[in-house]
């Protein structure tokens, strides 16, 4: 009898574990793209990656993206809501200050699309991105809107893997990799400058690729 109960409990544990993993992400039926518009893409397995606290694992079924601060209508967005908006795709290089880079096809929703839903107060100038691991960075509002900067949920036609920032990674085109926040769960609009995790440790707050990576 005890053996039967032990087997049953083990079965239930495994079932819950598997269900939890599948609810976080299920990309078993996806095929990774190797090129897009004639451009060769770096395989996900060969892409460089950095994180301050290791990979974060977020359940898409309970995930919420909060947008507040200097907006007309603070809002919470579910993963399913975000992925219903018109997607955009683009090949963009991620360039790290450490000297490595990779080329990927990113697919997601533009920051502007979500801000159009919340509205923007007239004197908002900067946008702060907060991540589930405590990371943060900021960008000028004009840069995000004028360049149609996206929040990606797919990479090389694959659902964004956990180590790449699932459910959302900011694709900060033209910026060094430390401006590309992963695991984003909160966006705040403000009217003053803000120094994020690396910027408060001496990195340049603009983070323009090709420019000085550190404050002068």
Image: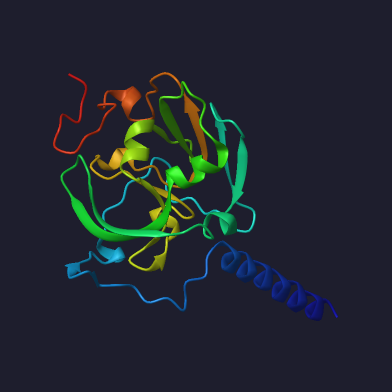
Q: Quadrant of residue 18?
A: bottom right
- 16 or 30: nearer the eye? 30
Which residue shows up at 47% across the image and 72% down it?
Answer: 27
In the rendered image, residue 117, in percent from the top left (x then y), is placed at 55, 43
Of the 4 image quadrants, the one containing the N terminus is bottom right
Q: Left of 100 or right of it: where is 182?
A: right
Q: Name the outermost residue toward the right.
A: 1
In the rendered image, residue 47, in percent from the top left (x then y), is placed at 26, 58
Against 129, residue 62 (above or below) is below
- 6 or 69: nearer the eye? 69
Against 54, residue 73 (above or below) is above
Q: Left of 89 or right of it: where is 174?
A: left
Q: Left of 132 or right of it: where is 19?
A: right
One can see residue 59 in this view: no
One can see residue 173 in this view: yes
Q: Quadrant of residue 59?
A: bottom right
In the rendered image, residue 213, in percent from the top left (x then y), is placed at 19, 31
Against 161, residue 27 (above or below) is below
Of the 4 image quadrants, the one containing the C terminus is top left
In the rendered image, residue 200, in percent from the top left (x then y), is placed at 35, 23
Q: How many marks?
A: 0
Q: Quadrant of residue 41?
A: bottom left
- 116 or 52: nearer the eye? 116
Which residue shows up at 52% across the image and 26% down it?
Answer: 121
């Amino acid at each position: 009898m005890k053996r039967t109960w032990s087997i049953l409990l083990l079965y239930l544990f495994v079932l819950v574990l598997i269900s939890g993993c599948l609810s976080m992400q299920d990309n078993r039926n996806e095929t990774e793209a190797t090129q897009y518009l004639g451009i060769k893409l770096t395989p996900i397995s060969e892409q460089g990656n950095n994180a301050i606290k290791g990979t974060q694992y977020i359940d898409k079924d309970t995930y919420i993206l909060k947008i507040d601060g200097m907006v007309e209508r603070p809002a919470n967005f579910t993963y399913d809501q975000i992925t219903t908006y018109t997607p955009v795709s683009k090949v963009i290089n991620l360039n790290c200050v450490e000297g490595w880079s990779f080329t990927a096809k990113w697919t997601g929703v533009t920051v502007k699309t979500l801000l159009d839903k919340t509205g923007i107060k007239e004197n908002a100038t900067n946008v702060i991105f907060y991540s589930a691991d405590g990371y943060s960075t900021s960008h000028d509002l004009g840069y995000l809107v004028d360049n149609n900067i996206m929040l990606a949920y797919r990479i090389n036609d694959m659902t964004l893997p956990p180590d790449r920032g699932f459910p959302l990674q900011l694709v900060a085109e033209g910026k060094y990799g430390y401006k590309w926040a992963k695991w984003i769960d909160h966006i705040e609009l403000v009217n003053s400058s803000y120094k994020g995790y690396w910027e408060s440790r001496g990195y340049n707050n603009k983070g323009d690729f090709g420019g000085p990576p550190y404050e002068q």
